[in-house]
Structures are given as structure tokens and as C-alpha cells.
Image (cartoon, coloured by chain):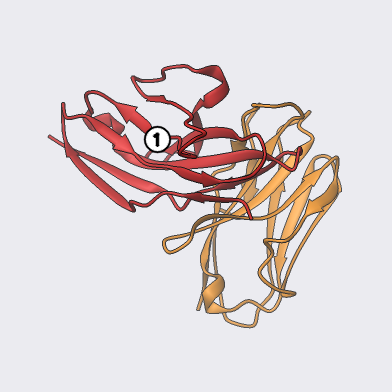
Chain colours: A orange, B red
Amino acid sequence: DAGVIQSPRHEVTEMGQEVTLRCKPISGHDYLFWYRQTMMRGLELLIYFNNNVPIDDSGMPEDRFSAKMPNASFSTLKIQPSEPRDSAVYFCASSWTGPGNTIYFGEGSWLTVV
Amino acid sequence: AQRVTQPEKLLSVFKGAPVELKCNYSYSGSPELFWYVQYSRQRLQLLLRHISRESIKGFTADLNKGETSFHLKKPFAQEEDSAMYYCALSGISGGFKTIFGAGTRLFVKA
């Protein structure tokens, strides 16, 4: 398995534009997480899904952010409209049911909003 | 509210010196704690988990429920240990929600 696959790896966009980040979890995993990494705040959990259903989106910063998981092999995180303070590395990660199980991370999507 | 605190953003030690990366958590339930590591140009990956009580790459971590801590220790640091280390808390509310601390960057000097 190629692991969790994220695209794009790097994105530079202008303020106000829509940004869509994509994720393919590891096959067979039933949990999918979106995290945001910044120097100031570290790794923040934005939202997570179980069996394609959003379970907890309390970490989503504001209404400009939305996430979907239409099927077990694909998820998107959308920012509309984007702002400079959204600049960060966005990680997608997946795991499977069970205590003490490992979360597997993608390589991250580096977003810069200018 | 659940929280993971890593008080040090940067920790710099000499090769061969002992290292301790601090992690404190706030959670009223039964915690599941982990350490993840991110080496340069690599993915964030699991280092160790408290339920396994294992030693990985010479690192150990003991869960201290009284002090609500899960500090990561290694008696003799190596240059290849230089990386970003994240403490994580899982099993929140009986589910699989996993939150991370802000991370500590460890720099091991030659």
C-alpha cells in the first residue's frame, strides 16, 4: 500500500480563492482525520470521520472550512474563501477501529495563501 | 476539556546526553497516550504507545496518572534522534478522537 495519499503537495493561492485539498486513506481503514500544522499551534485536529460519517468537527476554524467524505477511499477539505492566516500544512491521516491503534499520516499539503 | 501540553518548543542536547521530552495531559477518562515523531522530510509516524510498554530506538515513556504525564526519555541521545516529537491523546469519550500537543523539536548536537 502506498499509504495515505494527499494532493496537492504544495499550493499557493491568492486570498479569496477556493482551495480544495484531497486525501485517499489506506484501504480498509475506517477512520479518517484532517489536521492542521502551524508553528504557533502545532498539530490541531480539524475533523474526523468514521465509516465516511463526520464524527467531530469541533476543530474546524469557521464556516469557511468544510470537509466531505463521499466514499471510503476519498475525502476533501475545502476552504472558501481562503485567507492568509490559513497558510499551514494540512495533514490527512487514517486508522482502523480498535484501541491503541496507529494513525497513519499522509505527507501533507503545504498551503500558502498570499 | 481534553488537552495535551508539551511545554518545550525546542530542546537542544549534546550527543550522548540524556534527554527527556515532557508531556502532560488533561483528560478525566482513561487515557491512551502515544508519542509520534517526524524526521526531516519524512511522514509523521508512531514512535511508541503507552499500552505496549515498549522501548523503541532506545526511547521509553511511562504513563503517570497521578501527575497526568507521559514524558519521553532516552538515556543517551544520538544525532539521528533530531526530529519533531508530538505527544498524542486518544480514546477520548470512548471513541477514536486523537489530539496532539504542540510538539517539541529535539536537536542533538555532535
Chain bearing tag 1 is B
In percent of width and height, residue A86 lies at 56, 71
Q: Nearer the viewer, residue B19 or A25?
A: B19
Q: Residue at x 53, y 75 (%)?
A: A85
In the image, residue A111 above or below residue B54? below
State the quadrant of the C terminus of chain B.
top left
Q: Residue at x 49, y 35 (%)?
A: B66
Q: Which residue is label 1 attached to?
A: B71
Q: Residue at x 46, y 44 (%)?
A: B24
In percent of width and height, residue B87 lies at 48, 41
Q: Quadrant of residue B73?
A: top left
Q: Nearer the viewer, residue B32 or B40?
A: B32
In the image, residue B108 above or below residue A80? above
Q: Residue furthest bottom?
A: A16
**Disc 1 residue type?**
His
A111 to the left or right of A98: left
In the image, residue A34 above or below residue A114? above
| Secondary structure beneath label 1 | loop
In percent of width and height, residue B67 lies at 45, 39
Within 10 Å of disc 1 (Cα), the crowding (few <14, some 14-19, many 20+) is some
B83 to the left or right of A16: left
A59 to the left or right of B68: right
Q: Quadrant of residue B92?
A: top right
A36 to the left or right of A28: left
